[in-house]
Amino acid sequence: MGAVLGCIADDFTGATDLAGLLARSGAAVSLRIGVPDESEAETAAEFEVIALKCRTAPVEEAIASCRAALGWLQSAGASRFFWKYCSTFDSTPEGNIGPVAEALMADLGASQTIYCPAFPENGRSIFMGNLFVGQQPLHESPMKDHPLTPMRDANLMRLLAPQVRGEVGLIDRLTVAKGPEAVRAALAEHASNGVAHLVVDAVADADLAIIAEACQDMPLLTGGSAIAQPLPALYAKGQGAPQRGSAPSVPEGALVLSGSCSQMTRAQVAAYLAQAPGYKLDPLELAKSGPGAALNWLKGQAPEQNPLIYATAEPDEVRRAQSELGVSQAGEVVERALAAISVAARDQGTRRFVVAGGETSGAVTSALGVTRLDIREEIAPGVPWCFAKSAGSDIAITLKSGNFGAESFFADALVKLDAS
Ligand code: ADP
């Protein structure tokens, strides 16, 4: 039946966030890591999300990868598209939000699009074109000091204008509050004045619902993940609630892998160690002798105990490893070890994986050869269970970055999978 909506996300965690919100509707949502092969187009889900890594790539490179993603999504059957970036409008003075939007518009023959990074549930709101993080304007929020994309202005029109060739305008909250008809009328008026790029105010989910309803037929929408959440229900209108097929069944026995050292993950590891066997990786030992000892330990564990292997450590331990090995080398030995352990576990028959850490997740999915994730039930906001193929077998995997999830996350995940 092909894709209904094709989405392009500028980074991996942004893609999971978007895929999770779309999947809340019950629709079939598939997340692809990178642009898939042409032959994969036949297997498209209703909602396709392609995760790229182009937030801070050189502009031309970002445009090229997004256009390739667009081409694949078109061949998968999509006729409406969504360009997903961060809800804090993370971009450099040159892009890549505006240049990619303009390139996609050109490919689609679209004369107008909207920019709506608002995510009220997470405190991101837009008023009179100014983006707020909680009660702070963007340029006073911690984003002002971001290492790659420091945001020094809160005004989205001023941020966007240098990134695009076309005219930039605003549909403000006073118009949005009047409802979808008023938004449509404002879009038409801007179109007659040749304004192609419209920043749209939203301070609450009700605003997003109005904007999504008004803009649902635009070939291209752009924004944070929240503006896309109402789309599955709108697109399914008249066809009943969206339905995804049943999930494959995967044998019991999970492996929990943690390479995140964030505060919440440290608490999650401590909580889980009270109920399951655990093995702690030491980066210095790994640098010397590799993951052999951990692999031996794993072989001796009963799979139904759902063991945990973790490098998660307190900040002073991390600093010690980093000063001995260097920051990137310390990270790499851990990532490489967790990747090798995941492959060994799969080869021993493990089919359920809980992974903590953004970078760690990238290393593990890549080692397992996972390129497609079918998104299922959320365990915690923003962290769904996913199903994938690894070396020809069905696996269930959840990828949790940094501070997501409650203290009981690892146990919650296992319970949720059994219940689904
Ligand atoms: P998060 O989502 O919490 O940021 P990531 O996996 O993205 O987690 O990043 C954590 C980084 O820290 C990874 O590169 C990981 O390999 C590294 N790391 C994990 N444990 C240790 C440790 N004990 N010492 C040094 N670095 C570590």
Image (tube, rainbow, N blue to C red):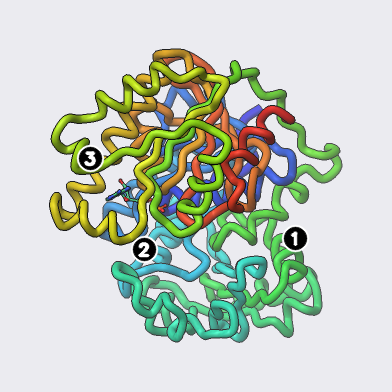
Residue indicated by mark 3: 333
- Which residue sits at x=58%, y=57%? 225
The residue to which callout 2 is attached is 96
- Label 1: state its secondary structure: helix
The quarter holding residue 272 reads top right
Marks 1 and 2, the one that precedes in the sequence: 2
Circles 1 and 3: CB atoms closer than 8 Å: no
Instruction: Report which residue position mark 1 lands on.
Output: 213
- The mark nearer the N terminus, 1 or 3, is 1
Q: Residue 152 carries which label?
A: none
Is residue 61 rendered to the left or right of residue 288?
right
Mark 2 lies within 8 Å of ligand 1 (Cβ measured): no
Q: Measure the alpha-carbon separation of dots 2 and 3.
A: 32 Å
Percent position (x, y) of residue 293? 27, 25
Question: How far is the residue under mark 1 from the one under mark 2?
Answer: 27 Å
Q: Name the residue at 73% across, 85% down.
A: 174
> What amino acid type is highlighted by mark number 1?
Glu
Front label number (2 vs 3): 3
Cβ of mark 3 under 8 Å from ligand 1: the answer is yes
Q: Is residue 387 toward the left or the right of residue 142 in the image?
A: right
Residue 302 image point, x, y percent: 50, 18
Badge 3 element: helix
Residue plotted at (36% across, 51% down): 313
Q: Quadrant of the N terminus?
A: top right
* Place of residue 303 in the rendered image (x, y in percent of width and height, measured from the top left): 52, 19
The amino acid pointed to by label 2 is: Asn
